[in-house]
């Protein structure tokens, strides 16, 4: 007699990282979920975390490229300004100032604190903004371009006390304005968070992700509790440079 044994194999259990569990616990502590709901929520959050990790890697690469571009543009600016001057004494003064003034651009700092983007040194950043709670359930990031007032500040820092003919003065302002505009273009576009811990209580995610996560729950009371722990990032962006002459 031949006996055939049926061998059944269960699918491999999903593995969740420590970060996955931390985010899950922050959102669902005190909320009772069925086994199916718990697994659905964990898988959903784990997938978002993986997308966020890939996005972070892409942003690091973009920031490296932006830094290289800003170095090149700064060298072009410095060379152009130095070529305007007609004597070694003025060039020595300008060279010393160029090495002491921070490179333009601005750095992006996005974390759990209320600051989204901050200017770098006296040059300022081409874009600035802030993040904070909006109506108790949101995070707002706004970007606005600076005007040519920053060019005047930099002109004073670099060329104050150096005698310039009218055409040299105009050329220097033009160089600084062109430099600022190129620096703005060289900054990488900010990527909206897919999933991020904020502070000690909230989790940041996109509006569509928030809706999908809340849909897993079966009653409004639980949805209200989880929703109170989600901060939705809302971006308002205005990248247009000021019109010429302003």
Image (tube, helix red, strand yellow):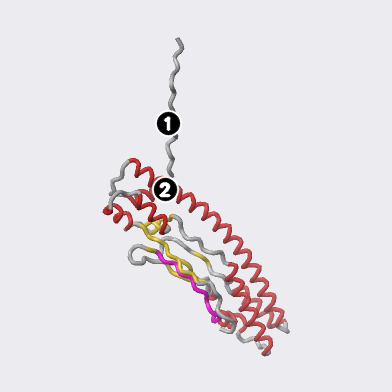
Residue in view at x 41 percent, y 66 percent: 140
Relative depth, front residue between 81 and 226: 226
Quarter of the image where the C terminus is located: bottom right
Residue 97 found in image quarter: bottom right
Residue pointed to by mark 1:
10
Residue 92 found in image quarter: bottom right
Q: Count of labels shown?
A: 2
Instruction: Measure how far apart labels 2 and 1 are at the Cα level.
Output: 21 Å
- Find the magenta span and give its range: 139-149
Q: Position of residue 85 (x, y in %)?
A: 70, 83
Residue 144 located within the stretch drawn in magenta: yes
Q: Which mark is residue 44?
A: 2
Residue in view at x 38 percent, y 56 percent: 210
Q: Position of residue 22 (x, y in %)?
A: 38, 49
**Would you call the spot at circle 1 few (<14 residues within 10 Å), some (14-19), or many (20 or more)?**
few
Is residue 203 rendered to the left or right of residue 52?
A: left
Residue 234 located within the stretch drawn in magenta: no
Residue 131 found in image quarter: bottom left
Residue in view at x 57 percent, y 61 percent: 63
Q: Is residue 19 visible?
A: no
């Amino acid at each position: 007699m031949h006996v055939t044994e049926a061998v059944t194999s269960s699918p491999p259990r999903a593995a969740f990282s420590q970060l996955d569990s931390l985010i899950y616990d922050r959102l669902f502590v005190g909320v009772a979920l069925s086994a199916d709901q718990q697994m659905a929520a964990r898988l959903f959050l784990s997938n978002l975390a993986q997308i966020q990790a890939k996005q972070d890697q892409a942003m690091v690469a973009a920031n490296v490229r932006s830094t290289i571009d800003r170095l090149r543009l700064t060298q072009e600016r410095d060379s152009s300004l130095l070529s305007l001057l007609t004597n070694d004494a003025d060039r020595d003064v300008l060279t010393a100032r160029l090495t002491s003034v921070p490179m333009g651009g601005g750095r992006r700092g996005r974390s759990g604190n209320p600051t989204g983007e901050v200017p770098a040194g006296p040059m300022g950043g081409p874009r600035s903004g802030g993040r904070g709670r909006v109506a108790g359930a949101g995070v707002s990031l706004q970007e606005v371009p600076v005007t040519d007032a920053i060019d005047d500040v930099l002109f004073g820092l670099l060329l104050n006390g150096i005698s310039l003919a009218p055409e040299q003065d105009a050329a220097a302002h033009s160089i600084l304005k062109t430099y600022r505009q190129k620096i703005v273009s060289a900054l990488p576009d900010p990527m909206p968070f897919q999933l991020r811990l904020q502070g000690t209580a909230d989790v940041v995610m996109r509006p569509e992700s928030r809706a999908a996560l809340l849909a897993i729950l079966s009653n409004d009371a639980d949805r209200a509790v989880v929703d109170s722990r989600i901060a939705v990032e809302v971006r308002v962006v205005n990248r247009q440079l000021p019109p010429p002459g302003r």
